[in-house]
Amino acid sequence: MIQGKNHLAGQTSPYLIQHADNPVEWYPWSNEALERARHEDKPILLSIGYSACHWCHVMAHESFEDETTAKMMNELFINIKIDREERPDIDKIYQTAQFVLTQRTGGWPLTMFLTPDDQMPFFGGTYFPNEARHGLPAFKDLLQHISKVYQDRRAEITAQNQSIQSVLQKIHEPTYALTDLSPDLFKICNQQIEQAFDVKDGGFGPAPKFPHTTHIERLLRYYTQSISTQQDSPRSLHAAIFTLEKMAAGGLFDHLGGGFCRYSVDSHWMIPHFEKMLYDNGPLLALYAQGFALTRSEQFKNVCEATAQWVIREMQSPEGGYYSSIDADSEGSEGKYYAWDRDQIKQVLDDDEYAVFSPHYGLDRNANFEGRYHLHTFVGMDAICQQAEISEENFKTLIRLAKHKLLSQREKRIHPDRDEKILSSWNALMIRGMAIAGRILERTEYIESAQRSLEFLRNRMWSHQHLTATYKDGISHLDAYLDDYSFLLDAILEMLQVRWCTEDLTWACEIADVLLEKFEDKAQGGFYFTSIDHERLIQRSKTLSDEAMPSGNGIAAMALARLGYLLGNTEYLDATERVLKFAGQAVTHAPMGHASLINAYEEKHYPLQIIILRGRKNDLKKWQKQCTLGFEPRRLVFAIDSDERNLPDALIEKKYFEPCPEGVVAYVCEGMSCKAPITSLAELQSAIADTGNPQ
């Protein structure tokens, strides 16, 4: 029997809907809930999580579905449930507050207790069990204790709140001394990442191991730049490529269905936390494609194809947008969907298939996941081919057939839940990944998939110079954040390089203008996480460091500069300069944590190369392909049909003209300086080589 009215029905967040039948009188974050807390003078119990979160489910089953616990929560607190994916603004604030209060890193579920008049946190933690264990109090005991503290120790809480407010102010609204960045940071950052590199298993640091895509990208960019400056850095390349190889071979990667899980619980990338997040897979898809461009590794190509196919098959909505995540749990058990009994596999595969599949994925060893097998590469192709006396081609065929059979069998299982809300920022990351993979692997279906998502964002989540953060079931709402705007601007610039669309360029300029108008700190430089007309919270955060996703400030700085150079717009370039000056002190203090900002600085320090190709459509493709060979992170190539109209002035000047024997005119620009028009592909290749960029 429900103790009080639950207010979560009708929300767009699947995570909130999961709690709509709880006996807890949950509210979404709303004026109604905050006003009731003030009126009744009850502290707020703030619970933050997300639908794919395993421990969020555990705490829900243990406590939020329990009538006795719910009754206590309803009597003592005003209870607010938040999806951290829809409200990263609130999550950022209270994750930081949890660390300030406890000196422990946060996570999900996040459990915070707030004073009702100002929403300041006075106690916090993450998961609390229903019974005392592992050094944690029972949740019901904690509820009673917190309520009593609030009633009996108001003066202490008020004093603590003032102190917390001051600390949060310094963290979320930093006032750094404006500092110029130094080129020394490229080497220092690279050394820090290399020092954290696990030479045995790849990755950075001990378990649990996360992909750290910004670190891998930074290593690849440093290596590429080191070649052009005759300071070859093979260790950087090795650390990046070896990490990509190990992740692809490990259980972090879904060898049957494609896509990567969130992180590995061990140092070998063997057993993951099984949730699959769109925001991991977009950057990873881009990295594996770029790794393939550098190495021509068949493994990397296979990873790209499997991941892109998974995204199109399972993560793209009929409307075009990409869904958010796949749950870690199915049938109440984490990883159950992905694990196998040995006999199950034997029944599905024929003898020849099993003979190579078993040693390759460790079925001839002890089970590696709770008495069952989660696929992880143990023995490579060469060793199995030698032992079984079969050809590489035969091995690949047998493995391909085995995977197809097992995936078909796995599809019959009860699937983990899918979070079907569509987030602007995460879609932008995947659009970028699909565009890069489509260009490098020459797969038009990836580009078409990205195009569908981009059109969805424009048609459903963009209106009157305003972007929304989330969409589900026909409802688009919540003001978009810095990450939404900056990631989308970056994604559009990648899409323009695979297929020119002047309308998209216009949209990119509109997004850039909103960033400057509503997010930029005009006094100090840099961008706030929320817009100037966003709901007022206890802090307006301005974060610079990379987290699970790249820094919104770093991506904004890079994308604005790229757009500024493309259009000759100094307003965008000046904004990038202000970001880098504001961030200079933080980046200098901790380079490794600010790889995205260092990437932006690299493109300021070493002139960005932009190649504009104008010509007949069929001729453009050949030239464009030649200009995009290899991994060239500081080269942008835009192929624009000679008949394209309504271009901005900076591009109208770069026009097609006759006579032109090869059907294309190329304009090679570095920074704000452009070479004379080039009408020969051989001459263009020579001009590109002369810039010092490696081919």
Image (spheres, rainbow, N blue to C red):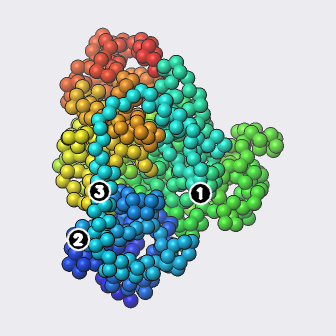
Q: For mark 2, give the secondary structure.
A: loop
Is residue 102 something one can see in this rendering?
A: yes
Q: CA distance from mark 2 to mark 1?
A: 41 Å
Position in image of residue 643 (x %, y %): 26, 25
Compared with 421, 177 (above or below) is above
Q: Which mark sits nearer the N-terminus, 2 or 1?
A: 2
Position in image of residue 670 (x %, y %): 34, 20
User: Of residues 412 and 241, which is closer to you in this image?
Assistant: 241
Q: Residues within 10 Å of mark 3 (few under 14, many from 20)?
A: few
> At x 42% / y 11%, what residue is drawn?
683
User: Of residues 617 and 495, which is closer to you in this image?
Assistant: 495
Q: Which mark sits nearer the N-terminus, 3 or 1?
A: 3
Location of the N terminus by quadrant is bottom left
Residue receiving disc 2: 117
Position in image of residue 397 (x %, y %): 68, 44
Please state which of the two labelled residues, at mark 3 or mark 1, is closer to the viewer. Answer: 3
Q: Quadrant of residue 240?
A: top right
> At x 55% / y 59%, what residue is drawn?
273
Residue receiving disc 3: 166
Q: Residues within 10 Å of mark 1 (few under 14, many from 20)?
A: some
> At x 50% / y 56%, what residue is drawn?
276
Q: Residues within 10 Å of mark 2 (few under 14, many from 20)?
A: some
The amino acid pointed to by label 3 is Ser
The amino acid pointed to by label 2 is Asp
Please state which of the two labelled residues, at mark 2 or mark 1, is closer to the viewer. Answer: 2
Q: CA distance from mark 3 to mark 1?
A: 36 Å
Position in image of residue 638 (x %, y %): 35, 28
Callout count: 3
The amino acid pointed to by label 1 is Val
Residue 265 tag number = 1
Q: For mark 1, give the secondary structure.
A: loop
